[in-house]
């Protein structure tokens, strides 16, 4: 299996990249983003990894030939909505995602496309929470494309294997709460997933599909158990 990962420098992206590189059934991994992986980071020097660094994530016409031949795409690119205007958040969350997905649907018809959304996403697109509306619109648009599209809606995420969030406020939170997270995960298994579990679940869905197109935390955990 050959996979493409968007957002590989983020917390979830690092998790799925790690699982892809460790999985002997994954023959090749290509990451695509505005910045490349540091040589010293996980996967930075792996032989089956290739990186595409591109400033413009809203248009892929010039590199469509490089985006063909993939079996699956794991789209973990995104930004925190705090302090952002809806138009700016939508340009990144909806615009960048659909630009990539529409291109991939032409280059790899029927490929598996797994989008990292979030718990509480609003499929009606009419709710009070700005981020939830935009995520809902993004999900709905992806589900209409000629792709085997799946929406992952994790809730609270515990980083593992040395993975850290790019968002400063999140890093500060995890630094304080880190020692408690294993206990919280055991106490509230329905609400907390690890980066390792999300990455493993993505690979499993890419290989075998799933009965639902929208996966909440309980579904992601069911994939892992299955």
Image (tube, rainbow, N blue to C red):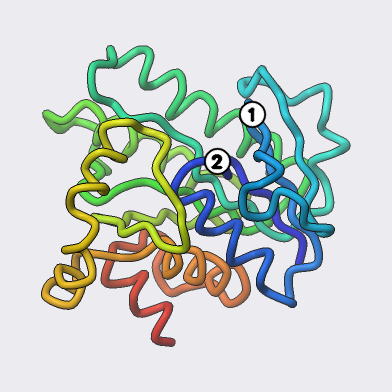
Q: Quadrant of the C terminus?
A: bottom left
Say if mark 2 contacts mark 1, CB within 8 Å: yes
Q: Distance of mark 2 from mark 1, alpha carbons? A: 8 Å
Where residue 81 appears, as percent x and y from the top left, is 28, 26
Q: Residue furthest right?
A: 65
Q: Quadrant of residue 67?
A: top right
Residue under label 1, please give it. Answer: 35
Where residue 48 appears, as percent x and y from the top left, is 81, 59
Within 10 angstroms of label 1, few (less than 14), some, or many (20 or more) residues?
Answer: some
Residue under label 2, please give it. Answer: 9
Checking the image for residue 112, the label placed there is none
Residue at 47% over, 57% down = 150
Q: Nearer the viewer, residue 144 or 14?
A: 14
Q: Quadrant of residue 169?
A: top left
Where residue 158 appears, as percent x and y from the top left, is 31, 59
Q: Quadrant of residue 107?
A: top right
In the displayed structure, 161 sits above or below 165; it is below
């Amino acid at each position: 299996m050959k996979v493409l990962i968007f957002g590989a420098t983020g917390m979830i992206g690092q998790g799925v990249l790690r699982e892809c590189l460790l999985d002997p059934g994954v023959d090749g991994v290509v990451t695509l983003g505005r910045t490349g992986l540091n040589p010293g980071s996980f996967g930075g020097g792996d032989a089956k990894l290739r990186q595409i660094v591109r400033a413009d994530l809203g248009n892929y016409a010039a590199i469509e030939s490089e985006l063909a031949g993939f079996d699956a795409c794991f789209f973990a690119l995104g930004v925190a909505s705090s302090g952002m205007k809806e138009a700016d958040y939508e340009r990144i969350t909806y615009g960048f995602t659909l630009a990539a997905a529409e291109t991939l649907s032409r280059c790899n018809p029927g490929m598996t496309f797994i989008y990292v959304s979030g718990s509480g996403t609003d499929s009606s697109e009419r709710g009070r929470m700005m981020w939830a509306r935009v995520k809902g619109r993004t999900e709905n648009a992806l589900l209409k494309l000629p792709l085997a599209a799946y929406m992952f809606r994790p809730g609270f995420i515990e980083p593992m294997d040395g993975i850290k969030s790019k968002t400063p406020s999140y890093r500060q939170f995890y630094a304080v709460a880190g020692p408690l997270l294993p206990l919280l995960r055991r106490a509230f298994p329905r609400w907390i997933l690890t980066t390792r579990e999300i990455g493993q679940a993505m690979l499993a869905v890419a290989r075998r599909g799933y009965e639902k197109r929208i996966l909440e935390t309980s579904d992601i955990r069911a994939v892992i158990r299955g």
